[in-house]
Image (tube, helix red, strand yellow):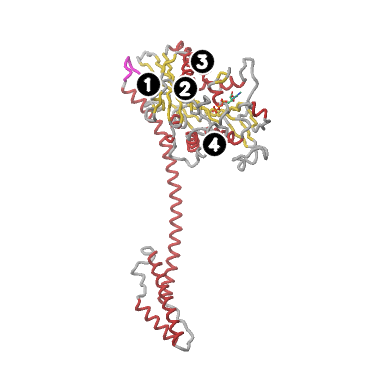
Amino acid sequence: MSTANVRTIVRVRPKSLRELSTNAVDLLTTDDNRNEITIHPPPEGLANSRHRHRVRGPRVFHFDKCFSPSAIGSNGQALEEEALFQNTGPYLVHSTLEGYNACLFTYGQSGSGKTYSTIGARGQTGLVPKLSGFLFKEIDRIQAETNATIRVSISVAEILNETVYDLLESKESTENDIHADASTHYFSQGFSQFEVENAQEIDAFLRLAAKTKETTIADESGKTHGHTAIIFKIHQKIPKTEKQISLQKESYLQILDLGSFGRNSHQKSENGIPSEFAGNDESLSVLNRVIASLTSKKHDLIIPYTDSVLTRFLQNALGGNCRTLVLACVSPCDFDDTFSTLRYAEAARKIKNISVINTKKIYGDSDENEFDTIVSSLESDRVQMKRHEEHSKKLLAIIDDLKTEYESRIRSLELQNTALKNHLCLAVDAYLNPVELNFPKKPGNKSQKSLNEMLQMELTEFQKDVKLLAKDFEGTVLSPQEFNPPRLQNIEEESLRHDSLLD
Ligand SMILES: Nc1ncnc2c1ncn2[C@@H]1O[C@H](COP(=O)(O)OP(=O)(O)OP(=O)(O)O)[C@@H](O)[C@H]1O
C-alpha cells in the first residue's frame, strides 16, 4: 500500500500567431527550476477580468513540475517535449507494471494545448504514442528477465453530455452499462477491450477511435467537445515459484484528455453568454467541486463523484486507489481562464491517494483459490476502511463543533428566558397592583364618562397583551396556575374604583 499526493504538472504553451500578431501581453512568469508560475493581472484597460478585484498584484502558484515554452530541438520537437515525457511516462508505466492503477488527465482552457500534449499534432508526437512505445519496451524487458506473461488491452471512450461513446465499437453506453471493476474499484467495465501486442497496434486503434469520433459525434467543423478516455488494462501472470505459487496482477492505466472550458470555447451557455464552463458540459464544474471538496478545510463528507460521468471515471484517480498525474495546460495571455486553471491545479496537489498493488496469488494450476481471493478482497476492504475511518474522524470533529455551538446557544436562550420571566412578572404585578391615579375632578358627567370609557379600553388592551405574553411563555415561564388574569368582573370593579377616585 502506498500513499501519495496527486502530482501536478503545468505546461505553458507559446503565444499563438493571433496573440503574436495582436501583441497580446504575456501574463506569466515561469520558473522551471523552482516549479513556480507567477501570474500578473493584466494592465489596466487591457481586459475586463472577473478575478482582478481579488488579485491586486502578482500571484505565485507552486506545482510538482512546470514547463515554459522552449526552443525547437534538432529533431523538430520542442525541447520541453522530452522533459515532459520523462516526468510523466516512466512514472505511469512503472506504476502500472508494478500493479498499481495509474492515471493522467489534462485540464485547461480551450486551445491551451491539452490535445497537443497528449495525442500530438502536425509532426509533434504527444505523450500517448511515446507512452505506448515505452510501455512495450518495458514489457519486453520484464518478460525477458522474469518469464512473466503480460497482456495489454485497450479501450477508448468519449464522454459527451453524460453519454459514453465506445469509440472502438461505435456504440453508445448508458450510465448503467459502465461500472467499476469489482476487485480494483476501477470505473472501466462495459466498453469493448481489444488486446494489443505493440505500439503500432495501439496507434491503429487510436486512429480507429479518431475516425469514429469524426463520423459519429463531431460537429460540422469536425471538432468534438467531449472528454476522451484511453484505458489500458495490464494483466500479468508471474510464473510459479518452488512453492507452486504464481502471481496475477491486474492494473489500469488511464489517460483522459478533458474537454475545454473557457471564454474562447466553442459553445456558449444556455443564455448565450460565455461562461467558465460553457465550452463543455456541466461535468467540468462537477470535477471542480470534487477537487474543492477533497481539499476543503471544512472536510466535506460527501464528495460529489456521482454527479457526473466524468467524475465517476476519475473517482479512483482523485482520492482513491490510483497514482495520478494532472497535466494542466495554460495560455500565456488569458488572465481569467489561466488563473482558474492554476488555482484548481494547485488545489489538486493536496489530494491524497492510497494505492495498492492489485495482485492475487494462485496455487497450483487453479486460479480460484478461495483463501487468496479473500485476502485480496480484505486488502481492498482495508483501504476502504481506512478511508471511512478518515471520514468518521472528520464527522466527529464536525459533531464536536456543533455541540459547542448548540451549548452556547442554549446558555444564551436560558439567559433570555430568565430576563423575559422577570419582565413578565413585573408586568403582571403592575397589572394586578396598579398605581392609584389621582385624576382631577372634572365638572359635568359627560367628560367623566368618556374618561371612564378610555380607561376601560386601555384596561382591555393591556389585558390582551398580558394574556398574549403569558401564552407565549406558557410552560416555560409561568404555568397557567401561576398566572391569574383578571376576569371581566374584576375589570368592572376596577373601573368603578377609578370612577370613585374621580368623584
Ligand atoms: N506547447 C505547444 N507548442 C506549440 N503549439 C502548441 C502548443 N500547445 C498547443 N499548441 C497549438 O495550439 C493550438 C491549440 O492546441 P490544442 O488543440 O492542443 O488545444 P486544446 O487545449 O486541446 O483545445 P480544445 O480542448 O479546445 O481542443 C493548436 O494549434 C496547437 O498546435
Residue behind mark 3 = 133
Question: Closer to us: mark 2 or mark 4?
Answer: 2
Residue 215 numbered mark, or none = 2
In the rendered structure, the answer to whether residue 71 lies left or right of residue 154 reads right
Where is residue 231 drawn, in percent x and y?
45, 22
How packed mark 3 is, by other alpha carbons closer than 10 Å (few <14, some 14-19, many 20 or more), is some
Q: Residue at image x 36%, y 78%? A: 490
Residue 360 numbered mark, or none = 1
For ligand 1, the image quadrant comes to top right
| Segment colored magenta | 360-368
Q: Quadrant of the C terminus?
A: bottom left
> Mark 3 is on which residue type?
Gly
Where is residue 415 drawn, in percent x and y?
45, 61
How packed mark 4 is, by other alpha carbons closer than 10 Å (few <14, some 14-19, many 20 or more), is many
Residue behind mark 4 = 276
In the rendered structure, the answer to whether residue 166 lies left or right of residue 130 reads left
Q: Is residue 364 magenta?
A: yes
